[in-house]
Image (cartoon, rainbow, N blue to C red):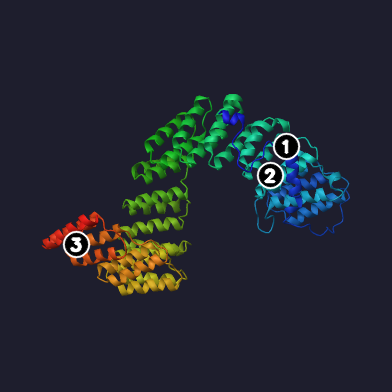
């Protein structure tokens, strides 16, 4: 704690204490003209109204911004008129308009970059002679524009603007100071932001408030420094008082710890905040419940849920989504279904992610029929299944060998406006290939290409693996060469499949060629564990001589046999009654292992 009180550790680029001259340096090094994505439109040709009211004009323009109906040229025409008139625009009207631009979402042919447009308009007022007379730039105006630079991902220019603000001699107020902190944090100058918060705010004539603390705490936690965030939080609570903090500050640090995997510290802070009289809200409880569910500590999550309800915080959609996902991924389907029903009884509707998680859990446990009922109810309740929903249920049917249901669902996709993608076709191909129905699998493969979809490495791997298992090595190699000609690079799984197939069917020359090829491409060669499993399988089938040939191949490519590999060959020779060979392997084992 003393570290924070004395001065926080600074990065090598930090030069705080920060004199005002440094802020002026920001302004001189980065002129305001450096961010001008839009140019002034040609002057309006409309005749000025006899009684033009800047207050009314800016109020109407602000409403159009909020409605997404104002075009950049309209904004420039407004400022053309303002700069021609002698009537100044009220401060609140100008700032309200710029603030609306700063927060305006992109909207088709209208405003595409509100923050950038606000900056350009601000530059016009600063640049043109009539600007200061018709638009007084206050601390609030500068704060809005600094925020625009943060939103435009140019916080360095926001810092330059703050330097200009200081040169103008304007009085710093809380909003400006907090926006300055935001610029520092966005510029990843978190150490400087901590220094300003703890030691420099008084020089700006301000006292840190909850927004100041939250801004810096969020930056610390976003940058993986949640422990420093906790130290700052505890120092503020001790020296300034818990009343200076709000619940957002605690939630920020708790969430930061969870992101860093520090579940214990997050839970300790959760209990500490309650001991200090800060009551958790639904967001806090959701953070705790989500982390516990992801850790599959469902009994603890249930305790927190009951505590939440007893404290009067009503579970929301996020709460139930976490619990349903947690129970589903833990395989506790009855509990998951119970939460699902309870959620709907409270008038809350699971989102598509939760529905898909529940579907996935049912399918993984061989309950595709029940999954289909949930799938159908999603449509009835207004939650249209997405491509992920279809993939999950198709995979469930494929795993259970329900080909008729699988194809029926696949055919329904088009009528429901869902286009099958490469992953969908790969699921179908894998289903048929798994059961040795290669003719059907290849028909799907062909249909996929006819629909303009290119097989990916997983698709090719699925086909090649099935062909190799069936001993159709020539066909497997044909697909292997095809994927390379199509620009799809084989991965380790593809090579392993072909090497295993070659070994199992006695083509050790091809196996060695493939090992050499994959190594030349920078793919690590198969391990002794990989070859050991092949040797063990052949020995159990009585093909001990073939297994010994692979053993020799292992040594030839530079791998060192393991004790397990030797044991497999010893067992194999014993199985076929060649005891002399078995003792020979034992002797070789003693010398090599």
Residue 568 located left or right of residue 353: left
The CA span between labels 3 and 1 is 79 Å
- Residue at the limit of the structure toward the front, as seen here: 591
As drawn, is 243 to the left or to the right of 66?
left
Task: Answer yes or no: is residue 280 visible.
Answer: yes
Residue mark closest to the camera, 2 vs 3: 3
Residue that appears at 36% across and 49% down = 361
Which of pointers 3 and 1 lies earlier in the amino acid sequence? 1
Q: Is residue 570 above or below residue 53?
A: below
Q: Which mark is residue 539?
A: 3
Depth check, mark 2 against mark 1: the one in front is 1
Mark closer to the chain start, 2 or 3: 2
Marks 2 and 1 sit apart, C-alpha to C-alpha, by: 22 Å
Q: Which residue is mark 1?
A: 19
Residue 147 bears which disc, if any? Answer: 2
Disc 3 or disc 1, which is closer to the eye? 1
| SS state under label 1 | loop
Marks 2 and 3, how far apart at CA? 71 Å
Residue at point 34%, 43% (across, down):
332
Q: Is residue 251 something that shows in the picture?
A: no
Quadrant in which the C terminus is drawn: bottom left
Quadrant location of residue 159? top right
Q: Quadrant of the N terminus?
A: top right
> Which x, y percent locates residue 497?
32, 65
What residue sits 39% from the left and 51% below the top?
359
* In this picture, residue 355 sits left or right of residue 10: left
């Amino acid at each position: 704690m003393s570290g924070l009180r004395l001065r926080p550790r600074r990065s090598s680029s930090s030069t705080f204490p920060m004199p005002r001259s440094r802020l002026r340096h920001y302004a001189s090094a980065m002129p305001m003209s450096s961010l001008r994505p839009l140019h002034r439109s040609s002057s309006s040709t409309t005749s000025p109204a006899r009684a033009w009211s800047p207050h009314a004009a800016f109020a109407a323009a602000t409403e159009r911004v909020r409605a997404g109906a104002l075009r950049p040229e309209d904004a420039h025409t407004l400022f053309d008129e303002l700069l021609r008139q002698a009537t100044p625009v009220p401060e609140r009207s100008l700032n309200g308009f710029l603030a609306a631009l700063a927060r305006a979402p992109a909207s088709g042919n209208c405003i595409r970059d509100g923050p950038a447009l606000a900056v350009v308009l601000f530059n016009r007022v600063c640049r043109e002679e009539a600007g200061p007379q018709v638009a007084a730039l206050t601390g609030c105006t500068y704060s809005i524009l600094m925020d625009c630079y943060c939103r435009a991902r140019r916080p360095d220019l926001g810092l330059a603007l703050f330097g200009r603000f200081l040169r103008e001699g304007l009085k710093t107020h809380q909003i400006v100071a907090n926006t300055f902190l935001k610029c520092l944090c966005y510029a990843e100058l978190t150490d400087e932001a901590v220094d300003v918060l703890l030691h420099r705010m008084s020089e700006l004539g301000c006292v840190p408030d909850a927004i100041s603390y939250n801004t810096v705490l969020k930056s610390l936690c976003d940058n993986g420094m949640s422990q420093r965030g906790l130290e700052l939080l505890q120092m503020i609570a001790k020296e300034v008082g818990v009343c200076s903090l709000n619940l957002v500050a605690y939630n920020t640090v708790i969430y930061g710890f969870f992101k860093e995997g520090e579940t214990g510290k997050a839970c300790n802070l959760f209990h500490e905040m309650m001991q200090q009289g800060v009551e958790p809200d639904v967001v806090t409880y959701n953070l705790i419940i989500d982390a516990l569910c992801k850790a599959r500590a469902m009994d603890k999550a249930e305790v927190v849920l009951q505590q939440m309800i007893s404290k009067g915080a009503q579970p929301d959609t996020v709460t139930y989504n976490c619990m349903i996902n947690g129970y589903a991924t833990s395989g506790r389907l009855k509990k998951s279904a119970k939460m699902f029903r309870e959620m709907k009884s409270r008038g809350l509707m699971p989102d598509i992610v939760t529905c898909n998680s529940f579907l996935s859990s049912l399918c993984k446990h061989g309950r595709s029929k029940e999954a289909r009922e949930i799938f159908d109810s999603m449509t009835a309740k207004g939650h249209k299944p997405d491509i992920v929903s279809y993939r999950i249920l198709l995979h469930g049917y494929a795993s259970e060998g329900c080909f008729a249901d699988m194809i029926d669902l696949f055919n329904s996709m088009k009528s429901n406006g869902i286009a099958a993608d490469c992953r969908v076709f790969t699921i179908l191909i894998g289903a048929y290939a798994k059961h040795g129905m290669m003719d059907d699998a290849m028909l799907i493969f062909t249909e996929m290409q006819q629909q303009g979809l290119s097989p990916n490495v997983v698709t090719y791997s699925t086909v090649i693996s099935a062909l190799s298992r069936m001993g159709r090595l020539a066909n497997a190699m044909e697909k292997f060469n095809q994927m390379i000609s199509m620009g799809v690079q084989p991965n380790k799984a593809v090579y392993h499949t072909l090497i295993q197939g070659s070994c199992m069917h006695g083509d050790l020359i091809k196996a060695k060629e493939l090992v050499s090829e994959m190594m030349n491409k920078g793919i690590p060669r198969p391990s002794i564990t990989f070859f050991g499993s092949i040797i063990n399988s052949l020995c159990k089938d009585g093909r001990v001589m073939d297994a010994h040939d692979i053993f020799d191949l292992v040594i030839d490519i530079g791998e060192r046999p393991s004790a397990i590999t030797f044991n497999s060959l010893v067992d194999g020779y014993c199985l076929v009654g060649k005891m002399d060979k078995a003792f020979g392997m034992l002797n070789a084992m003693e010398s090599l292992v």
